[in-house]
């Protein structure tokens, strides 16, 4: 079986990110629903930090696998 390519790894990371964001959205709505008078504040306090962390983590992982793929594809330089 051949090694996963950069594109397949990136696709998997994006799919996991989407699932995590849906779970975070569901959790934030659930927590906000417990106190309808404060729904907006509770939702924002829950959703924004978790979603931001997820998106930044995804960006970091994609950059990391891109660097790894570039290093593997470039020939070693003769010194």
Image (cartoon, rainbow, N blue to C red):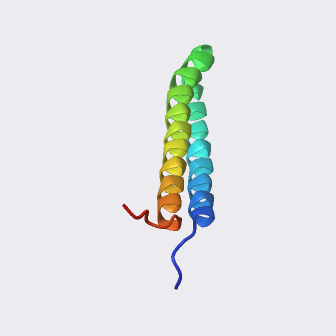
Count of numbered labels shown in the rendering: 0
* Above/below status of 24 relative to 46: below
- Image location (x, y in percent) of residue 70: 53, 59
| Residue 17 visible in the displayed image | yes
53 or 77: which is nearer to us? 77
Q: Residue at x 53, y 45 (%)?
A: 58
Q: Quadrant of residue 9?
A: bottom right
47 or 63: which is nearer to us? 63
Q: Is residue 37 left or right of residue 49?
A: right
Q: Quadrant of residue 77?
A: bottom left
- Image location (x, y in percent) of residue 35: 55, 20
- Image location (x, y in percent) of residue 52: 54, 32
* Above/below status of 34 relative to 64: above
- Image location (x, y in percent) of residue 79: 36, 60
Residue found farthest to the front: 79
Residue found farthest to the bottom: 1
Q: Residue at x 53, y 81 (%)?
A: 2
* Above/below status of 75 relative to 43: below
| Residue 27 visible in the displayed image | no
71 or 39: which is nearer to us? 71
Q: Residue at x 57, y 34 (%)?
A: 30
Q: Residue at x 52, y 64 (%)?
A: 74
54 or 8: which is nearer to us? 8
Residue found farthest to the left: 79
Q: Is residue 74 left or right of residue 18?
A: left
């Amino acid at each position: 079986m051949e090694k996963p390519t950069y594109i397949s790894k990136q696709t998997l990371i994006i799919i996991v990110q989407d699932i995590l964001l849906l779970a975070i959205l569901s959790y934030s709505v659930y927590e906000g629903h417990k106190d309808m008078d404060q729904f907006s504040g509770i939702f924002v306090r829950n959703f924004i930090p978790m979603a931001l962390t997820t998106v930044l983590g995804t960006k970091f992982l994609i950059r990391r696998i891109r660097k790894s793929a570039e290093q593997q594809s470039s020939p070693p330089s003769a010194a």
